[in-house]
Image (tube, helix red, strand yellow):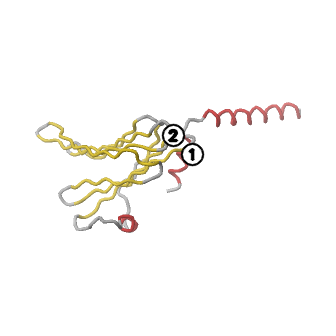
Amino acid sequence: MKKHVYLLLSSIALFFVSYQTNAEPVFAVKADIYKLKNEITIDSKISETLNSLTPIHQPMLLALLNESAQIEIGDKKQLTSLEIKANEDGSFFNASMKLKDKTDGQWQSITSFMPNIPSGQAVYFSRTFIDSVWLIKLTGTRYESEELGLASFKKQ
């Protein structure tokens, strides 16, 4: 009986070890979106300003390294699209924001691009509406496995 228990425990341990060695690195993307009134000025003390505010949305996603990931926010008339792509080893990522507005039934867009952002660093995008400004704090971080990437979302 002991032999079967040891064999079973060894098999389970071997399964988890082999699973961990085959785990594929991922890139965790977090976007904190704040809606600011037009009278709030954004300057070099941006972190202090945001500490006193609560995000209106906090989309998060995992992406494979060297693959594009996209977050879209908006409605049928105005759309904000964030596209993130980490490099092959996840040491940095590129980010772009497309502002899309529907005019006369056609989508018009403007794109802002930020290249070579180090893993773990936050970058900021903003979009102005009639009565407010959306400020988007975008962070991308490389993790060794999907489990670690998902765990990072829970730490917020």
Q: Are marks 2 and 1 in contact (CB under 8 Å)?
A: yes
The one nearer the camera, 5 or 48, is: 48
> Which residue has dot 1 on it?
148
Residue type for callout 2: Val
The quadrant holding residue 48 is bottom left
Pick the quarter of the image with the N terminus: top right
> Which residue has dot 2 on it?
26
**Image x and y of residue 103, in percent:** 13, 41
Q: How many marks?
A: 2
Residue type for callout 1: Leu
12 in relation to 101, above or below: above
52 in relation to 138, above or below: below
Question: Which secondary structure lies at badge 1?
Answer: helix
The one nearer the camera, 85 or 16, is: 85
Which mark is drawn over residue 45? none
**Image x and y of residue 114, in percent:** 34, 46
Residue for point 82% across, 31% down: 7
Q: How busy is the neighbourhood of tag 2: few (under 14 within 10 Å), some, or many (20 plus)?
A: many
**Image x and y of residue 109, in percent:** 21, 41
**Image x and y of residue 60, in percent:** 43, 47
The one nearer the camera, 4 or 87, is: 87
Q: CA distance from mark 2 to mark 1?
A: 9 Å
- Can residue 64 be seen here? The reply is no
Residue for point 25% across, 53% down: 127
Residue for point 52% across, 52% down: 154
Q: Residue furthest front?
A: 116
Horizontal relation, residue 143 to residue 84: left or right? right
The quadrant holding residue 22 is top right
Q: How busy is the neighbourhood of tag 1: few (under 14 within 10 Å), some, or many (20 plus)?
A: some
- Can residue 114 be seen here? The reply is yes
